[in-house]
Amino acid sequence: MNDPTAPIVIKRHRMATRVWHWVTVVTMFIMIGSGIGILKAHPRLYWGRYGANFDTAWTTLDQWPSWLVSLLNLLTIPAGYNLALSRRWHLLFALVLAFALLGFMIVSLINKHFQRDLRVRAAELSPREVVHDVKEHLAFRFHDPKKPGAYNILQKLSYVVTIFVLIPVMILTGLTMSPGMDAAWPWLLEVFGGRQSARSIHFIAATGLVLFIIAHLALVILAGTWNEVRSMSTGRWKVPAHTSEDVA
Amino acid sequence: MSSLITRRSLVMGASIGAGALLAGCDKIAANPEARKILFMGEDMNRGLQRALTNRNALAPEFSPAQMSPIFRSNGTSNPGTAEYTAMVANNFADYRLKVGGLVDRPLSVSLPQLRQMPSRAQITRHDCVEGWSAIGKWQGPKLGALLTAAGLQKSARYIVFTCADLFGGANYYESVDLVDAFHPQTILAWALNDQVLDVAHGAPVRLRVERQLGYKHAKYVMAIEAVASLAGIGKGKGGYWEDNVDYDWYAGI
């Protein structure tokens, strides 16, 4: 490095990661919008094998705050209410979501993205480390000066939960709502405790994904929007100045 | 300061982008060519389910203790036509289930005859396309037995059901393929929860096609027709909702 003021640019995300990320962005957007459309057809959630209007729901749309209902209305695909088209969008893009995730998982095991970047080490989970990372986040310092390209522990955990728990749970509970799949794979019903429980878990996991997306977007903005968006698009990531000063 | 402006403009930009994407989705769904792609999901899902799973797999059956306390009725609660009202008044004594189309021996079956056929009783879950489920006990002869008695011809590919209830002035209709028609749990139910089937749930006879959603389970079945193609039925998509509201013909998902 001849010019010490020149920004350090590193290669951060592999092609497979970048392609999967953006495919999933579009897919998630469609799945959330069309999923709200489907929920509106019967906005009551139950636990157990059955559940209809005469049965006890643990939550119903009329209990939700009006700002939330307005937001759900705003995001619905298609606009307004059209159960048939919501289902068309949802069930086509469900295939995109599932097979894209499967492909990404296979490639990321082969190229060792998971083992290298997402593997949580025991030392990282020590209370001291986690508290330290929380403090760093609150100070808006997101990168370890020694390893600026590595994910911190909170970041790792949120990605691991999303990739290995939330999205697979969405896919499996989605399959459990299919009467055809219940005949073929009855174990799905055993895993989730019945079709209506699966439907409830589907919406709880969807809420988890929405919270992840909100936190993810907020942190992208705080960490430097264009640098982060560029790194997920071209792979090139500029090491933040304060971090590279620390390195120097 | 400048970063604050950037952040605000980014949030604004993202919101406008999301709005444009939402509007774009509706534009796409309105375009006939894009609609074809969107509607390909149905064939992909049916193809995957049929290819990757046992096509004769049985829908889960439940114990009496697992049944819904009240089985919700949906759709038509009473066809209310003069003919149907007369049949109800007469306790369906004049009811004849017609089995025709591509069969060697067209049938006209009375309700007592239907009840005398060997029947199957099954406690299954009914899943409405809207999202709710109800578990109930259904009893009736297998559709396959009736089709065999009528002598289904080789050219038959689909079984079409015509019902007594009217939608937009025309009789409700639905159809299934032969995989589901001959599935052991596909029955013509004349009893629900050990009672003679009531009007709200489709008296006198209702189709049960247990691996598909509720709108496939035609109520008030009057006629069964074997056909080679769905092209001549309604608007050609095989069912009232399929023809008029773009519901999937394959409702296994």
Image (spheres, rainbow, N blue to C red):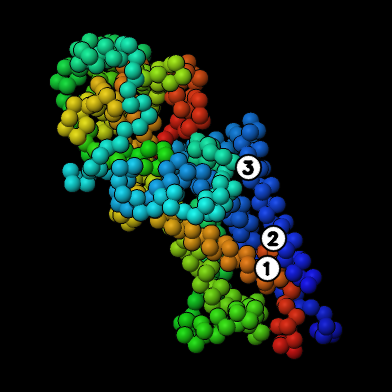
Q: Does the residue at mark 2 contact the one at mark 1 (Cβ under 8 Å)? A: yes
Q: Residues within 10 Å of mark 1 (few under 14, many from 20)?
A: some
Q: Residue type at mark 2: give it.
A: Val
In this figure, which residue is indicated by the disc labeled 3? Answer: B25
**Chain containing the residue with disc 1:** A
Left or right, B168 with respect to A29, comes to left
Q: Is A164 or B8 nearer to us in this picture?
A: B8
Q: Residue type at mark 3: give it.
A: Cys
Q: Residue at x 33, y 18 (%)?
A: B80
Give SS at disc 3: helix
**Chain containing the residue with disc 3:** B
Q: Residues within 10 Å of mark 2 (few under 14, many from 20)?
A: some
Q: Give the CA distance from mark 2 to mark 1.
A: 9 Å
Q: Position of residue A63 (x, y in %)?
A: 43, 52
In this figure, which residue is indicated by the disc labeled 1? Answer: A221
Give SS at disc 2: helix
Q: Residues within 10 Å of mark 3 (few under 14, many from 20)?
A: some
Q: Nearer the viewer, mark 2 or mark 1?
A: 2
